[in-house]
Image (cartoon, rainbow, N blue to C red):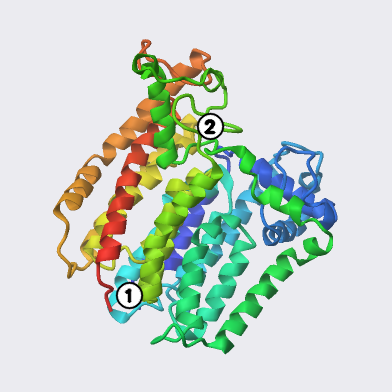
């Protein structure tokens, strides 16, 4: 293992030093969200955690994450007790900023542990000998991810810690002896952040077929394994939600975890099918009178338009949560069928990736940050062969560029741009050298489209920059809904950048489904 250079530890040290330099950088409202959660969990009894609403940033993560915040608050009161007062809204002393930034870095050690080649349960160490070097490169790409840098260390969240647990769970699924631990760890992860429900169907099918049923016959039920798995999952969820069941607070807790009233689109539009749908609706407003189409004037005059609250459409039919659920499930069924028929680890990672992708493309109120649910699991198998890499490249480019609007201040523009470009050039070139040739013939059309998108990635960055410039013009004109360029096409800069990358990701979903369903697993 000595030839694997640079090591995970070396990169982690350098990355940490760089992240410390970002402590004074821009921070989003998520910083105040987590400060408020520190205050709630430290100052109030558990029974009041999901009822407290002094701040608009109420606690809306599952109970295990609330306990995680409570643990952090025990250290926070030593640093600055003022940050733990519920009524001390928007409090951001330098001690508070440094503590919360440091807590993100410290908890991200879980991610380094998950990919650290020195640990027997890590991704690199558990890989076959012939794939140690590609696995090491993939591990470094995750550890140094520009997505995590933008979202966690500038914008502010704790995704590195959570994705570390996800990777540990995925790696534990690699061996029969640790499959049970994989399932229980994923159950605990769901009790930390419920966005991972997107991946739950893949886990369910894999654990059912690979752990609870016989390898040769689905009618051979392993009752002992099924009992251990069922008992363990009930114990995990019981520990998380049991007290709230006892107090009769489950309806209140669920209303916090699943606020369907927030609308189809998140504040920052995820580059998915609904971004394109909304963009199309805006275009149709201008041509609808000529085509004889009815226009909902309330939707035209609405100031939300997907930015906050509910989303309404002026011309196209309204989209309900039920529709998004059905579409998501339909597209998840494709990889789940293959996983049931062939419950290998590679197939499992592919199913996890595609379940996350289907949820991202068709889900309700999808956060733009959810693209990491696709990129990070896919990174584990991106170097399996060149067909996988061919689908990963446009996803990595479009996915990371789509996160740029999260940081809209001038000071952070060179950081996010230069770091992301450096990461893309470094790892995509390294991946290109390490990925073996596929034993399956490529599909000419999709392969050429992939190369075309990769060749135009700089145009996407330029397009986003153009949208940012127009956004400044838009703000100057005091038009909070949409910008107008010489009275021509009305286009939000955010919607513009999301639709550009959205087209890429819709294309990529077709490519990834095609290569994954048709390709044979490499033994």
Separation of marks 2 and 1 at Cα, in angstroms: 45 Å
Work out whether 86 lies above or below 49: above
Depth check: 498 or 427 in front?
Answer: 498
**Residue 496 rendering spot, x and y as whole percentages:** 39, 30
**Within 10 angstroms of label 2, few (less than 14), some, or many (20 or more) residues?**
many
Across the whole image, how many numbered discs are drawn on residues? 2
Query: If you read the primary sequence from the N terminus, does the residue marked by circle 2 or circle 1 appear first?
Result: 1
Depth check: 408 or 463 in front?
Answer: 463
Depth check: 256 or 104 in front?
Answer: 256
* Quarter where residue 353 is shown: bottom left
**Residue 360 rendering spot, x and y as whole percentages:** 45, 49
Residue at the spot of label 2: 306
* Quarter where residue 375 is shown: bottom left
Q: Residue at x 59, y 64 (%)?
A: 189
Q: Can you say which quadrant of the picture contains the N terminus? A: bottom left
**Residue 386 rendering spot, x and y as whole percentages:** 22, 62
Q: Residue at x 37, y 35 (%)?
A: 499
Q: Can you say which quadrant of the picture contains the C terminus? A: bottom left
Q: Residue at x 53, y 75 (%)?
A: 182
Label 2 SS: loop
> Does the rendering let one see residue 22?
no
Work out whether 373 lies above or below 292: below
State the mark number for residue 160: none
Label 1 SS: helix
Q: Is residue 418 left or right of residue 444?
A: right
**Residue 497 rendering spot, x and y as whole percentages:** 39, 33
Of tags 2 and 1, the one toward the viewer is: 2
Residue at the spot of label 1: 132
Do the numbered discs 2 and 1 sit on residues whose CB atoms are within 8 Å? no
């Amino acid at each position: 293992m000595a030839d694997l250079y640079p090591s995970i530890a070396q990169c982690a040290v350098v990355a940490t030093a760089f992240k410390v330099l970002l402590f004074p950088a821009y921070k989003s409202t998520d910083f105040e969200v987590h400060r408020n959660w520190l205050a709630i969990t430290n100052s109030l009894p558990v029974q009041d955690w999901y009822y407290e609403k002094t701040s608009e940033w109420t606690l809306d993560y599952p109970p295990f994450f609330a306990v995680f915040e409570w643990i952090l608050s025990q250290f926070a009161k030593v640093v600055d007790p003022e940050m733990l007062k519920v009524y001390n809204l928007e409090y951001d002393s330098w001690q508070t900023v440094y503590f919360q930034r440091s807590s993100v870095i410290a908890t991200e050690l879980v991610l380094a542990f998950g990919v650290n080649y020195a640990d027997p349960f890590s991704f690199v160490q558990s890989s076959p000998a012939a794939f140690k070097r590609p696995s090491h490169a993939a591990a470094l790409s995750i550890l140094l991810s520009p997505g995590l840098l933008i979202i966690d260390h500038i914008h502010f969240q704790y995704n590195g810690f959570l994705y570390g647990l996800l990777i540990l769970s995925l790696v534990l699924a690699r061996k029969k002896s640790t499959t049970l631990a994989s399932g229980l760890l994923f159950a605990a992860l769901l009790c930390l952040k419920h966005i991972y429900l997107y991946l739950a169907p893949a886990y369910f099918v894999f654990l059912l077929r690979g752990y609870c049923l016989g390898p040769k016959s689905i009618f051979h039920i392993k009752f002992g394994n099924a009992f251990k798995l069922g008992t363990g999952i009930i114990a995990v969820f019981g520990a998380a939600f049991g007290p709230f069941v006892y107090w009769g607070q489950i309806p209140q807790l669920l209303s916090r975890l699943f606020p369907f009233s927030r609308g189809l689109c998140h504040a920052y539009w995820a580059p998915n099918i609904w971004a394109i749908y909304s963009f199309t609706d805006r275009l149709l407003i201008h041509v609808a009178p000529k085509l004889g189409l009815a226009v909902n004037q309330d939707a035209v005059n609405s100031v939300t338009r997907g930015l906050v609250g509910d989303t309404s459409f002026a011309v196209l039919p309204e989209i309900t949560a039920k529709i998004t659920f059905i579409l998501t499930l339909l597209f998840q069924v494709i990889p789940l069928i293959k996983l049931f028929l062939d419950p290998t680890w590679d197939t499992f990672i592919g199913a996890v990736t595609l379940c996350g992708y289907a949820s991202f493309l068709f889900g309700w109120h999808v956060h733009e940050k959810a693209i990491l649910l696709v990129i990070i699991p896919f990174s584990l198998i991106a170097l399996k062969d060149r067909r996988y890499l061919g689908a990963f490249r446009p996803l990595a480019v479009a996915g990371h560029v789509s996160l740029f609007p999260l940081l809209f201040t001038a000071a952070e523009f060179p950081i996010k741009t230069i770091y992301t470009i450096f990461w893309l050039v470094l790892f995509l070139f390294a991946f290109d050298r390490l990925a073996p040739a596929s034993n399956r013939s490529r599909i000419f059309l999709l392969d050429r489209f992939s190369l075309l998108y990769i060749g135009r990635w700089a145009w996407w960055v330029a397009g986003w920059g153009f949208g940012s410039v127009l956004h400044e013009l838009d703000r100057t004109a005091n038009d909070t809904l949409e910008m107008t360029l010489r009275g021509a096409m009305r286009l939000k800069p955010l919607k513009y950048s999301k639709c550009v990358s959205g087209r890429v990701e819709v294309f990529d979903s077709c490519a990834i489904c095609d290569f994954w369903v048709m390709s044979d697993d490499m033994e």
